[in-house]
Image: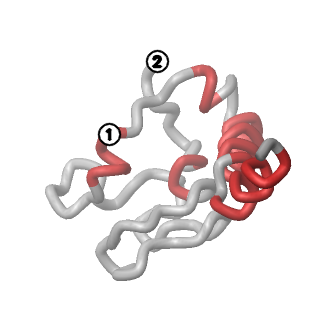
Amino acid sequence: MQCRSGCGACCTSPSITSPIPGMPNGKAAGEPCIQLLDDYRCAIFNDPSRPKVCADFKAAEYACGSNRAEAISILSLLENNTSPTHTDSLKRKYQ
């Protein structure tokens, strides 16, 4: 699957803990990346300063759905379900 133009869900929904140019502490889930342009393209897409986690992300239907709204929903759900707070409560529940 090719990255959809005008989406930018992966630049908004997930938290990113590695430094991003202009965001040395990364970004919180739901916070748009400072490098996300008004048309939802990444300003540093082909730049070597782009974080590895961003460069390694590959668009796939399971994460991106069929449109931006679905991608935001799916990635937000994945973020929530894998956050340390959520997984800690699951560990306690099943111990």
Identify the element where label 2 is drawn: loop
Reply above or below: 31 against 14: below
> Amino acid type of disc 2?
Met
Residue at 32% of width from left, 40% of height from top?
A: 56
| Residue 70, horizontal then vertical, whole percent | 75, 35
Q: Mark 2 points at which residue?
A: 1
Q: Residue at 63% of width from left, 55% of height from top? A: 13
| Crowd band around label 2 with a 10 angstrom C-alpha radius: few (<14), some (14–19), many (20+) | few
Q: Which of 71 and 67 is in front in this view?
A: 71
The answer for how far apart the CA atoms under marks 2 and 1 are is 14 Å
Specify few, some or many for label 1: CA neighbours under 10 Å numbering under 14, 14-19, or 20 or more.
few
Residue 1 percent coordinates (x, y): 46, 18
Residue at disc 1, secondary structure: helix
Q: Where's residue 33, x and y in %?
A: 49, 67
Q: Which circle's residue, 2 or 1, is located before the other in the chain?
A: 2
Residue at 44% x, 51% y is 41
Image quadrant assignment for residue 63 = top right
On residue 84, the disc is: none
Q: Which residue lies furthest to the right in this view?
A: 93
Mark 1 sits on what residue?
56
Left or right of 73? Residue 83 is left
Q: Which marked residue is nearer to the observer: mark 2 or mark 1?
A: 1
Please name whichever residue, 90 or 24, is drawn nearer the observer in this view of the structure.
90
Which amino acid type is marked by label 1? Asp
- 26 vs 67, left or right, is left
Q: Which residue is drawn at 14% across and 56% down?
A: 48
